[in-house]
Image (cartoon, helix red, strand yellow):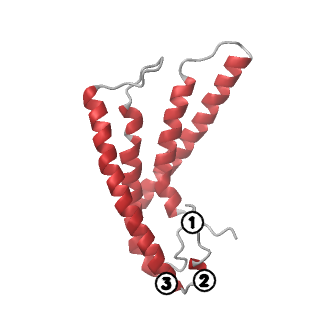
Amino acid sequence: MNIITRISLAAGVVGALLMAATGAMLTYEVVARYFFIKPTIWAAELSQMCLIWGCFLAMAQVLTLRRHITVNAITNLLSVKLQKVCAALALIAVIVFSVIVAYWGWDIFHDSFVRGRTTGSLMNLPIWITELSVPVGFALLAAQSVVELVRLPGDSHPGLGSSHE
């Protein structure tokens, strides 16, 4: 379980770095385009790839940190035992959904990889590079959800999200 959590943490760090890279690329593009009248052919496409990969890689760590958006107006009124039951049901739903998305996402990635599909943009990069983020991100989320489900009985704070009331 600790290995999966460490992988989630590492993926979250990589995701954060990709978000920072996205900001840097878009800033560079704005400066190049509007101040020097020399737009790039790479900034928009690479920043989109970084943004997509960053979001999908961060999902598992966000779950570990309990930062997913939750609506807990009713569950906060329940006993801790019932809150754990609700959290367990939510985690099971996340696991099922994540496994389905990872499975079909892999199928889409593999099809694009085999067929050699590209983005069709000026860079014409292979589209599978971006599509691979879906099965990877959701597989990490499914694995981390299993870890959180196993840890749930001993958890003193069973909520899956932040409380900002």
Q: Dot 2, how many residues are within 10 Å of its Cα: few (below 14), some (14-19), or many (20+)?
A: few
Relative horizontal placement of residue 145, taking residue 26 as reference (left or right): left
Residue under the image location 40 percent in, 66 percent down: 93
**How far across and down, in percent of the image, does residue 73 sit?**
62, 75
Q: Residue at x 65, y 25 (%)?
A: 28
Q: In terms of depth relative to the viewer, which is nearer, 2 or 15? A: 15
User: Mark 2 falls on what kind of element?
Assistant: helix
Label 3 vs 2, first from the N-terminus:
2
For residue 70, which numbered disc appears in the image? 1
Q: Position of residue 65 (x, y in %)?
A: 54, 63
Q: Going 60% across and 29% down the picture, which residue do you hit?
A: 25
Which secondary structure, mark 3?
helix
Q: Amino acid at mark 3?
A: Leu
Q: Quadrant of the C terminus?
A: bottom right
> Which residue corresponds to mark 3?
82
Taking the image as drawn, is residue 125 in sight?
Answer: yes
Q: Earlier in the sequence, mark 3 or mark 1?
A: 1
Which residue does the numbered mark 2 point to in the structure image? 77
Q: Amino acid at mark 2?
A: Leu
- Give coordinates of residue 13: x percent, y percent: 52, 48
Residue at 48%, 17% (x, y): give it. Answer: 122
Q: CA distance from mark 1 to mark 2?
A: 14 Å
Dot 3, how many residues are within 10 Å of its Cα: few (below 14), some (14-19), or many (20+)? some
